[in-house]
Amino acid sequence: MLNLAVPTDEGWFERIVDELDTVLVDHAHLEKRAASTALSMIFRYTGRAQLPRKLSEVVQEEMDHFVRMLDLLETRGVAFKKLDPAPYAALLAGHARKQEPEALLDRLLIAALIEARSCERFTILSKRVDDPVLAAFYEELYESEARHHTLYTGLAREYFPGPVVKARLSELAEYEAQALRASSGMVRLHSW
């Protein structure tokens, strides 16, 4: 369902659990970036049927998640601060083609893969964190990320033939796995 080439390795949670507050700060940044990505597509592809309306819902939901992350950080006494981002998203975005309409396809599928990875990570966090409030929050976010993944792949299939979408999604999923591995050694939501 998530179209990921590789699952999260079993050691990821052990590598981040002692620095969960850093992962939470990173997660807050990722929510605002997800909103920004959807908003930039609305500006760039305004004339595409359904895209502005569907992605405006994503923008609103991601910003709601951002505010909820800020609340969560405040409740836990964790400062929202600047972090060096993992190279994950930048490396993955570097594989997007520049020419239209292929650029649109790649942007949609890259967003779908990032949402899929987040979805997978939220499942792990919901099952493994000791804090029941945090676990419930991540279980709720899992459903939202899965919806976003489906929305982005659905838009791709609306604008491009199914076999083209499937082939490019498979290619980009391999790049996503490489980008994830390149984030090794960092304590981030999207790190190896």
Image (cartoon, rainbow, N blue to C red):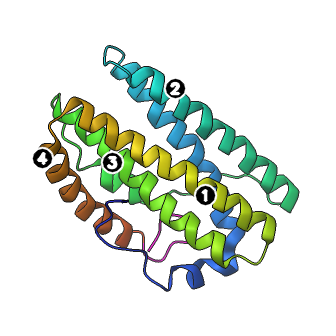
Location of mark 2 (residue)? 56
User: Which is more N-terminal, label 1 or label 2?
Assistant: 1
Q: Position of residue 132 (x, y in %)?
A: 79, 70
Location of mark 3 (residue)? 110
Is residue 168 covered in magenta?
no
- Taking the view exactly as shown, the residue that stands out farthest to the top is 47
**Label 2, label 1: how far apart the Cα atoms are:** 23 Å
Label 1: element kind: helix
Of discs 1 and 4, which sits in the foreground?
4
Residue in front for this viewpoint, 184 or 107: 107
Q: Which mark is residue 163?
A: 4
**Label 4, label 3: how far apart the Cα atoms are:** 17 Å
Is residue 35 at least partly visible in the picture? yes
Q: Position of residue 86 (x, y in %)?
A: 47, 61
- Which amino acid type is marked by label 4? Pro
Question: Around disc 1, counting alpha carbons within 10 Å, would you say few (fewer than 14), some (14 to 19), or many (20 or more)?
Answer: many
Is residue 188 at least partly visible in the picture? no
